Image (cartoon, grey):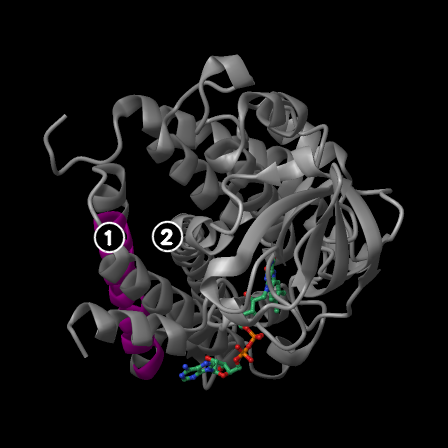
């Protein structure tokens, strides 16, 4: 492999197998699951059987890796499933909750939570955001007070993907003073007394169980502390790189699929005696978007390459995240436009692409925050 190649022949074969799996076992059910606002737990189990949750981990934890590039391939292909909610539910499990257990947990914690997560038998979530603190992570207020061999949690989280169906949540809570320094990560299992959830109604990502979490004198064993006490903020920042990379990868793949939908519709729909896609304004618009998707993909792969090489990719990841997610939204908006009135009807899948893509520039660090970070890397 030359240093410019990211994917090997094995990766491409793996890509084909995941794409076939998505086409065979997810796409045919997307409409039904979206209407129900839910998708079955068996999808996690099937992904587990396919090995999609173990690519970043060695065999001792049930994985087949570590192969971060293969994991990126899985993310791209799952993002082609036609539902942002399904992709997000699987992604929050794979790349947030359970990845935190691997990255920051000890051997016992990995065996307890990671191994069943890799099999898709346990579902994971990450709870950082609070009703009053999203971009400003250091302002979180949920508190975990050590009392003997337990932490007592009090507080609230908001917008947590998988929140109301997860078997465990990696919760960011304040164990020390105010600001960056006093935050720790603590695993809270579903069913723990004092821990309740409330599913929120969302504009898009309608199958992904976005939820509020409530902790009221919730007693959690002190051994559920993940990583170093009071170093939770650093851990969150470490994983943000990966979270933003997978959002960029997923957005590029989603945009590509949405553009296909738009071009297909443009070829079928006739106006003024010819297909819409044959009018120059649409031909050029599609050409522009296809070019921008190729550029966003190249930037995202560049960031992935740097990340895999162990180099600092803060600037490139932040660039890729905002560019790819904003583009995903713009492509969805143009795709809806070419559908005319049908684009505004619920029976066409483009409406879902439009609603789902809107979250990209908000979740996992907003576009404004990405630009703040990029500016900072230039000393501004
Ligand atoms: C569907 C969904 C799923 C999510 N899943 C999860 C999850 O699984 N786990 C989790 O922990 N969180 C999750 N989130 C939360 C998400 O990461 C936050 O919504 C996001 O980080 C923004 O935070 P906020 O909503 O509090 O917005 P705010 O921080 O209040 O920002 C509001 C606006 O102000 C802008 N702004 C803020 N600060 C600045 C600044 N310094 N300069 C310029 N503009 C600024 C923002 O860009 C934004 O436009 C999810 C959110 C949604 C909607």
Residue range highlighted in magenta: 281-303
Q: Position of residue 174 (x, y in %)?
A: 61, 59
Circles 1, 2 touching at the beta carbon (< 8 Å): yes
Q: Say which residue label 1 marks.
A: 313
Query: Who's the residue at 70% across and 64% down the image?
Result: 157
Query: Who's the residue at 17% across and 35% down the image?
Result: 5
Q: Position of residue 369 (x, y in %)?
A: 39, 74
Query: Who's the residue at 77% across and 70% down the image?
Result: 201
User: Label 1 crowding class (10 Å Cα cut-off): few <14, some 14-19, many 20+?
Assistant: some
State left or right for residue 331 relative to residue 83.
left
- Helix, strand or loop at mark 2: helix
Above or below, comparing residue 256 to residue 26 in the picture: below
Which quarter of the rendered picture does the N terminus lie within? top left
**Camera-side residue: 321 or 287?**
321
Q: Is residue 249 magenta?
A: no
> In the orientation shown, which residue stands out farthest toward the front?
148
Q: Say which residue label 2 marks.
A: 241
């Amino acid at each position: 492999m030359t240093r410019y190649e990211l994917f090997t022949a094995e990766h491409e074969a793996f890509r084909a197998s995941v794409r076939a799996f998505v086409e065979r076992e997810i796409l045919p059910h997307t409409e039904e699951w979206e209407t129900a606002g839910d998708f079955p737990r068996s999808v996690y189990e099937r992904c587990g059987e396919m090995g999609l949750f173990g690519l970043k981990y060695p065999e001792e934890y049930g994985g087949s890796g570590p192969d971060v590039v293969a994991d990126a391939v899985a993310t791209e292909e799952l993002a082609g499933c036609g539902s942002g909610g399904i992709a997000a539910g699987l992604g929050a499990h794979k790349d947030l909750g359970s990845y935190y257990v691997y990255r920051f947990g000890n051997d016992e914690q990995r065996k307890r939570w990671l191994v069943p997560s890799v099999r898709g038998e346990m579902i994971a979530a990450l709870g950082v955001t609070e009703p009053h603190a999203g971009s400003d992570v250091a302002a979180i207020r949920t508190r975990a007070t050590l009392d003997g061999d337990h932490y007592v949690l009090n507080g609230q989280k908001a917008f947590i993907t998988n929140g109301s169906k997860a078997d465990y949540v990696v919760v960011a809570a304040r164990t020390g003073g105010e600001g960056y320094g006093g935050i720790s990560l603590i695993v809270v299992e579903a069913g723990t007394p004092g821990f309740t959830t409330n599913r929120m109604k969302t504009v898009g990502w309608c199958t992904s169980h976005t939820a509020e979490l409530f902790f009221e004198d919730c007693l959690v064993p002190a051994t559920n502390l993940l990583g170093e006490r009071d170093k939770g903020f650093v851990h969150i920042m470490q994983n943000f790189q990966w979270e933003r990379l997978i959002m960029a990868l997923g957005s590029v793949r989603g945009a590509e699929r949405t553009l296909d939908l738009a071009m297909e519709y443009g070829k079928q729909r006739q106006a003024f005696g010819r297909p819409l896609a044959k009018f120059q304004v649409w031909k050029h618009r599609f050409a522009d978007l296809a070019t921008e998707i190729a550029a966003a993909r190249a930037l995202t792969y560049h960031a992935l390459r740097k990340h895999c090489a162990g180099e600092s990719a803060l600037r490139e990841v932040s660039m890729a995240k905002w560019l790819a997610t904003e583009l995903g939204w713009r492509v969805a908006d143009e795709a809806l436009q070419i559908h005319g009135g049908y684009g505004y009807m619920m029976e066409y899948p483009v409406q879902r692409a439009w609603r789902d893509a809107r979250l990209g520039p908000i979740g996992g660090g907003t576009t404004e925050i990405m630009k703040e970070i990029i500016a900072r890397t230039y000393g501004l």
